[in-house]
């Protein structure tokens, strides 16, 4: 007779699960992130991406790396505007990394009609997040999970992914982005 508790349907496997099968991706992702390399995992639903992320996060944290998981479905996609969505991402980063940043005050001071919301978000990364991480002499990894949660947003999301790419590209000119 099989114990049904050995089977998990939907979502991440618990960290202690004996049914998790380590793959080459486990070490590749861990090593890439330890070296501050931009990394992504793309695959179909229910293929172990979130379980891989949870396990990699735990390994990184054991090595002194600050990690945050942003589950885009928790920010919302209905009845939300662009500024609310980006400020929700900021909140998740600040809370997840336990930063000493008053994100609401920072966001309110920077959000205005003269620059785009994605520029405000990029400013948060450069002006608030990176200096805070550097002051604490640590590295930070931001995991973005449930990307399909942005499909129904009432605004374009190209800029979000373009900003991620831009941050990666800025590492050559601004070493702080290597954090």
Image (tube, rainbow, N blue to C red):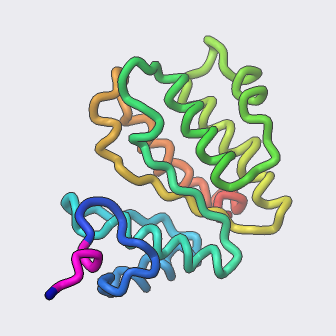
State yes or no: residue 97 in magenta.
no
Residue 43 horizontal/vertical position (percent): 23, 63
Considering every residue shown, the one lying at the far right of the view is 135
Q: Position of residue 46 (x, y in %)?
A: 22, 63
- Residue 56 located left or right of residue 46: right
Q: Quadrant of residue 23?
A: bottom left
The magenta stretch is: 2-7
What residue appears at the point 85 percent right and 59 percent down from the top-left corner?
135
Q: Is residue 54 visible?
A: yes
- Residue drawn at x 61%, y 60% as measured from the top left: 171
Q: Is residue 135 left or right of residue 75?
A: right
Q: Nearer the viewer, residue 34 or 171?
A: 34
* In the displayed structure image, the side of residue 101 where residue 79 appears, left or right: left
Where residue 109 appears, x then y in whole percent?
Answer: 76, 21
| Residue 23 appearing in the image | no
Pick out the residue farthest to the left: 1
Residue 6 lies in the magenta-colored region = yes
Indicate the quadrant where residue 62 lies: bottom right
Q: Image height check: is 160 above or below 30?
A: above
Quarter residue 88 falls in: top right
């Amino acid at each position: 007779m099989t114990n049904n508790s050995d089977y998990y349907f939907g979502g991440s496997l618990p960290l202690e699960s004996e049914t998790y099968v380590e793959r080459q991706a486990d070490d590749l992702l861990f090593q890439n992130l330890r070296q501050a390399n931009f990394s992504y995992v793309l695959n179909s639903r229910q293929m172990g991406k979130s379980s891989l992320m949870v396990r990699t996060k735990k390994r990184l944290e054991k090595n002194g790396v600050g990690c945050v998981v942003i589950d885009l479905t928790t920010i919302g996609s209905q009845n939300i505007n662009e500024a609310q969505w980006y400020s929700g991402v900021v909140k998740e980063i600040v809370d997840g990394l336990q930063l000493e940043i008053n994100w609401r005050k920072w966001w309110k001071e920077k959000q205005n009609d003269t620059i785009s919301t994605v520029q405000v978000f990029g400013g948060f990364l450069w002006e608030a997040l990176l200096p805070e991480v550097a002051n604490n002499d640590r590295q930070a990894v931001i995991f973005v999970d449930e990307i399909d949660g942005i499909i129904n947003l009432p605004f374009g999301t190209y800029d979000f992914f373009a900003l991620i790419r831009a941050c990666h590209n800025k590492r050559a000119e601004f070493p702080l982005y290597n954090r």
